[in-house]
Amino acid sequence: MPLPEPAAAPPAAAVQPAVLPAVLPTAAEQAAVDPAQRALAAPLLTDFTARLKAAAPVTALWVHGSLALGDYRHGRSDLDLIAVLPTAPDARLRGELTELHRRLIAEQPGGEKLHCTYLPQGDLADPAADHFTFAQGEPMDRPVTPVTRRELLDGGLRLAGGAPAGLLPPVGDRDLHAHLRADLRTFWYPVTDRPGPWRRDIWVDLGPITAARATVALRENRLITKREAIAGLPALGAPPALVADIAARRYGTPAPLTVGQRDRRAEQARLFTRTAIERALR
């Protein structure tokens, strides 16, 4: 899809630190709470690790995302795991793993937020291959992308088996950039043509945050946390009310919205994400 010329850069007033919502923690505040937040996730991770080892041979089990790299919020953040198995799970094992996750959801508080992709050793070097995954309450197939691989290599947590650096090949900046550009151009940008999805909180949050994280990765060759992405939204021209709404949902208590306010917020999130993608892809 051809992209239009990006909009002009936001005015200087839009990038002042004063527009950051008070609920957003500073880097120091985040670092101070990270150990306690990780500790809250430990019982669920320990239980899942034991159940998985009883169900299947596990070469390695890793955590990526916010728990590994910082900015985890217990009860709000997902737990993103990768399990390396000797071979791809067959139909029988897929059924057993699905049942394992469903029992975990039924028996463990927060079990619905634990997502795991099952990566066979033979596909460790293939970021395009789809793999059995249980996420968002259901089984599916999806790849272990260059972004996930880079997260694992930069600071993934090892729950069992070998460390990511000992099994995964490196992810160069060129491969990371190619994946990000393709994801923005072929998935996220077309979604900004459709007003409907942006009435949901998940799109309001993920669209701007994804655009901000991709912008930094393409410019600076580094992956940032969601907290850093939210803090960077004003500098990209995001409306202050939109930034405050996203921050409150992750770190505080969002204000209730009328139908009209939700519609206006949806349009703000959609148009901001569209413009941010256009700038990122220049």
Image (cartoon, helix red, strand yellow):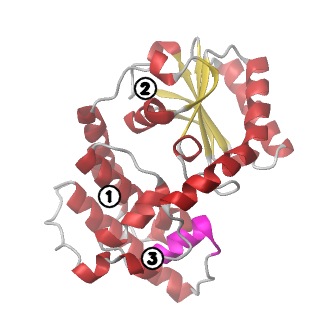
* 9, above or below 123, in the image: below
Nearer mark to the viewer, of 3 and 2: 3
- Dot 3: element: helix
Residue 190, which numbered label?
A: 1
What segment carries the magenta color?
A: 243-253
The three-letter code of the residue at mark 3 reads Leu
Q: In this image, 171 relative to 204: left or right?
A: left
State the image coordinates of residue 119 (x, y, percent, origin top left): 54, 23
Q: In this image, 91 relative to 208: left or right?
A: right
The three-letter code of the residue at mark 2 reads Ala
Instruction: Report if the CB atoms under discs 3 and 1 are less than 8 Å apart.
Output: no
* 207, above or below 112, in the image: below
Q: In this image, 24 relative to 42: left or right?
A: left
Decide which of 204, 216 is in the foreground and name it. 216
Quadrant of res 282: bottom left
State the image coordinates of residue 88 (x, y, percent, origin top left): 57, 17
Q: CA distance from mark 1 to mark 2?
A: 23 Å
The three-letter code of the residue at mark 1 reads Pro
Asked if residue 193 is among those painted magenta in the image, a careful observer would answer: no
Q: CA distance from mark 3 to mark 2?
A: 36 Å
On the question of residue 142 being in view, the answer is yes
Image point (45%, 37%), residue name = 151
Q: Find disc 3 in the rendering and name its residue.
A: 242
Nearer-N-terminus badge (3/1)? 1
Nearer-N-terminus badge (1/2)? 2
Q: Find disc 2 in the rendering and name its residue.
A: 129
Decide which of 153, 53 is in the foreground and name it. 153
- Dot 1: element: helix
Magenta region, main secondary structure: helix
